[in-house]
Image (tube, rainbow, N blue to C red):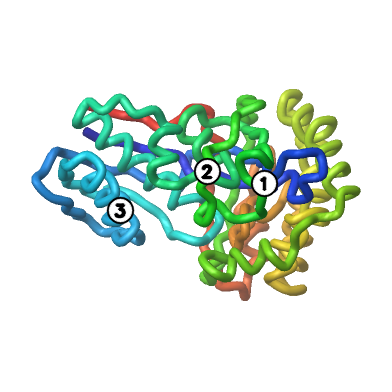
């Protein structure tokens, strides 16, 4: 059995104020590349084969399912990508391994059940929805009856947030600019949330207005100019502003230069930047990032979820 997942851009969290009774909420879109691809088969114990950036993560998740269901698995990692760079590898690995267990052993687990078992999607539901459906996604966050504190997904026991909008992503080109440094995770990510929440309600309201009346219509109408304007403003308000500011003024200058070529923002807690344009001129991108220690990946949006080949 072979399973191939998308990766994802996380554009922004929506409401880290909670005044009206819900928190979190997320906006993002699925990517064709990079991706997780595994070959899985039944086994007596857990075995991870193949070269991987995330061997420990694959083993950790597989052992969760072995302990829960008493079955082993052999996983050959065919393709994966760097963790903690803002592209959601942890969620995609968790869902891929859980899906493999479910299919191999007839467990009939839904994607959201797998997410609950592996504690993914407790803040943003974008990665889970990207695995399920692909496309451009908005999730509705969590009621404060279910989750009453501002925590990153890895530290939240809340279920994945409900999907409230899903559109096909336009046939635009995307360049990922991935610095060698890692983003915020673990205690550093918890500290980021604690120091920068609650967000001012005025900024949450502006962000909601931008998402509903600018960003979503731009995707639906394939209007890159409006999409670029919305993405640029999102980097300057709410929790996204705090995420971006962690990397300093030089990082913001780099993002501003890239915004001259199209829509550019930072994914999740970073440090990956994404550039969206009708046509990417890679030479122009290379000129701007010259002197920075970055990896460039050209890709497109993915309008379907994970694929399973039995």
Q: Position of residue 53 (x, y in %)?
A: 35, 61
Q: Which residue is mark 1?
A: 11
Q: Is residue 31 visible?
A: no
- Nearer to us of marks 2 and 3 is 2
In the picture provided, is 178 more to the left or to the right than 22? left
The image shows residue 124 at horizontal and vertical percentages of 59, 44
Q: Which residue in the protein does label 2 denote? A: 121
The residue most toward the front is 145
Which quarter of the figure is the N terminus placed in? top left
Work out whether 124 lies above or below 246: above
- Element marked by disc 3: helix
Disc with the residue nearer the chain's start (2 vs 3)? 3
Upstream in sequence: badge 2 or badge 1: 1
Whole-Å distance between the Cαs marked 1 and 3? 26 Å
* Residue 58 location (% of width, % of height): 30, 53
Report whether residue 222 is seen.
Answer: yes
Instruction: Identify the residue at horizontal 42%, vertical 32% (top origin).
Output: 111
Q: Quadrant of the C terminus?
A: top left
For the residues labelled 2 and 3, the Cα–Cα distance comes to 17 Å
Q: Is residue 287 left or right of residue 206?
A: left
Query: Looking at the image, is mark 2 or mark 1 nearer the viewer?
Result: 2
User: Which residue position holds label 3?
Assistant: 58
Nearer the N terminus, badge 1 or badge 3? 1
Q: Residue at x 75, y 59 (%)?
A: 197
Classify residue 19 as left or right of residue 72. right
Judging depth in this view, the residue of 282 and 142 nearest the camera is 142
Identify the residue shown where x is 80% and y is 50%.
232
């Amino acid at each position: 059995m072979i399973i191939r997942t998308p990766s994802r851009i996380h554009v922004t969290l929506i409401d880290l104020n909670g005044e009206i009774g819900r928190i979190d909420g997320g906006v993002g879109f699925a990517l064709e590349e990079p991706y997780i691809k595994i070959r899985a088969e039944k086994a007596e114990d857990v075995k991870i084969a193949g070269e991987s950036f995330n061997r420990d993560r694959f083993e950790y998740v597989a052992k969760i399912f072995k302990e829960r269901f008493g079955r082993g698995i052999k996983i050959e990692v065919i393709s994966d990508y760097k963790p903690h760079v803002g592209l959601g590898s942890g969620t995609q690995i968790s869902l891929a391994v859980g899906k493999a267990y479910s299919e191999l052993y007839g467990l009939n687990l839904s994607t959201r059940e797998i997410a609950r078992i592996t504690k993914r999607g407790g803040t943003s539901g974008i990665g889970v929805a990207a695995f399920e459906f692909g496309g451009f996604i908005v999730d509705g966050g969590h009621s404060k009856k279910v989750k009453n504190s501002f925590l990153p997904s890895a530290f939240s026991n809340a279920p994945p947030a409900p999907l409230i909008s899903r559109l096909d992503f336009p046939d635009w080109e995307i360049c990922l600019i991935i610095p060698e440094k890692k983003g915020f995770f673990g205690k550093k990510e918890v500290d980021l949330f604690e120091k920068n929440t609650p967000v001012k309600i005025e900024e949450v309201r502006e962000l909601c207005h931008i998402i509903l009346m600018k960003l979503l219509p731009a995707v639906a109408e394939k209007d890159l100019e409006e999409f670029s304007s919305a993405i640029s403003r999102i980097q300057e308000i709410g929790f996204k502003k705090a995420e971006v500011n962690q990397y300093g003024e030089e990082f913001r200058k780099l993002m501003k230069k890239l915004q001259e070529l199209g829509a550019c923002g930072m994914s999740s807690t970073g440090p990956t930047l994404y550039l969206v344009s009708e046509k990417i001129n890679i030479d122009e991108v290379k000129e701007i990032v010259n002197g920075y220690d970055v990896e460039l990946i050209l890709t497109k949006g993915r309008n379907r979820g994970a694929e399973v080949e039995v």
